[in-house]
Amino acid sequence: MIISIGSDHAGYRYKELLKVRLTDLGHQLTDMGTYSTDPVDYPVFIRPVAEAVAAGRFERGIVLGGSGNGEAIVANRVRGVRCTLCWSVESARLARQHNDANVLSLGERLIAEADLLPIVRTWLTTAFEGGRHARRIALIDAAT
């Protein structure tokens, strides 16, 4: 899968871990920054990830921060993005099955490192169920 990834300083360490692990699994990643733990303003690095996914240049996007909340808010401001904040395998599975989420937001301060890859793997491999969920997504898209 072709994935765009970005973080602020508080999500930097997990971003770097994911880059290695997902590349080892055969995914192609493009890092939109940040490139260190120096404090930054997260919208500068999150918006480009969301815009690239919305434009179709990437199949999925992953954004990371301390809690993931602000990152999800920024990403969801971009038309065509359905960003979900996930904290467990189950939340990741449902985000894909029911919401066809195309951007994943993660909070480094709220997720144990051992849970990181299982959450991301589940989100990457779970298919969208369609059906009644497709109708709901159409309603969401019609409102923006």
Image (cartoon, rainbow, N blue to C red):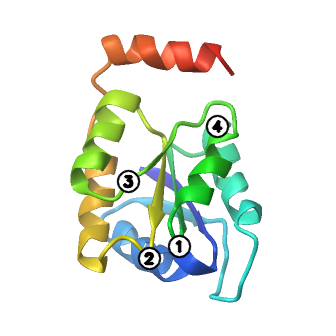
| Residue occupied by mark 4 | 54
User: Measured along the vertical axis of the image, is residue 44 above or below residue 72?
Assistant: below
Gap between marks 2 and 4 measured at Cα = 27 Å
Residue contact between numbered discs 1 and 2, judged by CB atoms under 8 Å = yes
| Residue occupied by mark 2 | 109
> In the image, what residue type sits under mark 3?
Cys
User: Measured along the vertical axis of the image, is residue 132 above or below residue 56?
Assistant: above
Indicate the position of residue 54 as horizontal and vertical percent values: 64, 37
Nearest the eye: 69 or 42: 69
| Residue occupied by mark 3 | 86
Label whose residue precedes the other's in the sequence (2 or 4): 4
Label whose residue precedes the other's in the sequence (1 or 2): 1
Label whose residue precedes the other's in the sequence (4 or 3): 4
Residue contact between numbered discs 1 and 4, judged by CB atoms under 8 Å = no
Gap between marks 1 and 2 measured at Cα = 5 Å
Q: Secondary structure at mark 2?
A: loop
Q: Secondary structure at mark 3?
A: loop
> In the image, what residue type sits under mark 1?
Gly
Nearest-to-viewer mark from 4 and 3: 3
Indicate the position of residue 119 as horizontal and vertical percent values: 29, 59
Q: For this view, does 99 lie left or right of residue 5?
A: left
Dot 1 alpha-carbon crowd within 10 angstroms: few under 14, some 14 to 19, many 20 or more: some
Nearest the eye: 67 or 30: 67
Dot 3 alpha-carbon crowd within 10 angstroms: few under 14, some 14 to 19, many 20 or more: many
Mark seen at residue 66: 1
Residue in the image at 57% along x and 51% along y: 72
